[in-house]
Amino acid sequence: MHKFAKIIVSVTITITFVFLIIISYGCKTEPKAQLQRFEFGEPYMGTWWRIVLYAPNKEIAETAAKSAFKRIGELDNKFSDYYAETELMQLCYKSGKGEVKVSKDLYDIIQKSIAVSKRTDSAFDITAGPCVQLWRWSGRHNQLPSEEKLKAALKLVGYEKIKLNPKNQSINLLMEGMRLDLGGIAKGYCADTALKILKEHGITRALVAASGDIAIGDPPPDKQGWIIDIGTGEDKTNTLGLKLCLKNVGISTSGDIEQYIEINDVRYSHILNPKTGLGLTNSIQVTVISYEASISDPLATAACVVGLEKGLKMIEPHKKTSALFIIQDGTNKTIKASSRFPIKI
């Protein structure tokens, strides 16, 4: 559903840009081994990726980071819907024509996506690709898609139209013309994967960040966790003043603070509601913390779609998941956290 190259609209739909500011120091604890801090960055999926890690020396750090970025690039080349030759698009071109054997990576992320769709009652749905295409067109032309085109696109939406065959590692898109959009989960999934690559190189004290999605490993030496600032996106100083001390989790922020368009005096978010095919008209930002970024990423988007009341009901039953909602209504701002959120609001 949303998120690769977040645009002001011409992009896929998902987590809005970075509202999470990473700081590599945290609460004090017992001293650990002598490690040095290193930071690396490269562009993928229409945004800047950061890897911050602690390693014994520069050579080990660079080798590990290089391997992690290489893996991100490989997944980008499989998951993007912007290029006809990607594995994702090759699958979509064969929609309605039976089962297609796919790579373990593509099968895994689609399987995870379907699980989140079930959990969120389709508030997150990667089959919304046809609507995403229409919305990108709307962003370029500053007008809503026709009712006829929107109805046709919505007929292709619904995660139930994806059939998985685990025995053959194959996927069947049941209706011709279906198009998947992994934008709302791909960054979180790739951040988790990169963190695993670092661990394979013996580096556990690290985090991987892409726009509003962060996969966090063990804390920096002598600290209890990584300090994450949460801002509202209304200014670049992030004056909300909420600081989280986190380790071994994924954290994602979605919202429409800057990524939106106005058509006929109505403000539409870059985040689509899969059930209407249109951008959200409520101004909302949601930060979700979960056990991995491939869960926090799509849940943050889904929570934006359903809003505060339903979003809290969606988050609360899951012990390893929490959320912070910020709703802007004119000059009024409502800030509400789920019961397990690390900071009480």
Image (tube, rainbow, N blue to C red):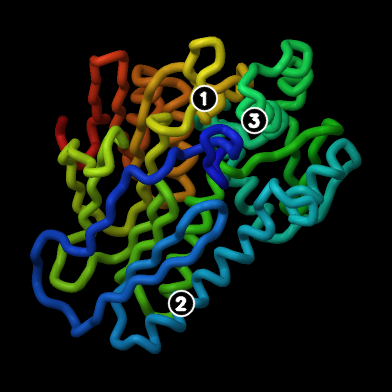
The local secondary structure at tag 1 comes to: strand
Q: Is residue 103 left or right of residue 305?
A: right
Judge depth for marks 2 and 3 and give the one in front.
3
The local secondary structure at tag 3 comes to: helix
Q: Determine which residue is flagged by label 2.
A: 200
Residue 24 position in % (x across, y down): 23, 64
Q: Residue at x 15, y 34 (%)?
A: 344
Seen from the viewer's position, the closer of residues 72 and 44 is 44
Q: Determine which residue is flagged by label 3.
A: 140
Judge depth for marks 1 and 2 and give the one in front.
1
**292 in relation to 177, above or below:** below
The local secondary structure at tag 2 comes to: helix
Seen from the viewer's position, the closer of residues 132 and 195 is 132
**257 in relation to 49, above or below:** above
- The disc at residue 261 is 1
Q: Quadrant of the N terminus?
A: top right
Location of residue 328 (image quadrant): top left
- Which label's residue is closer to the chain start, 1 or 3? 3
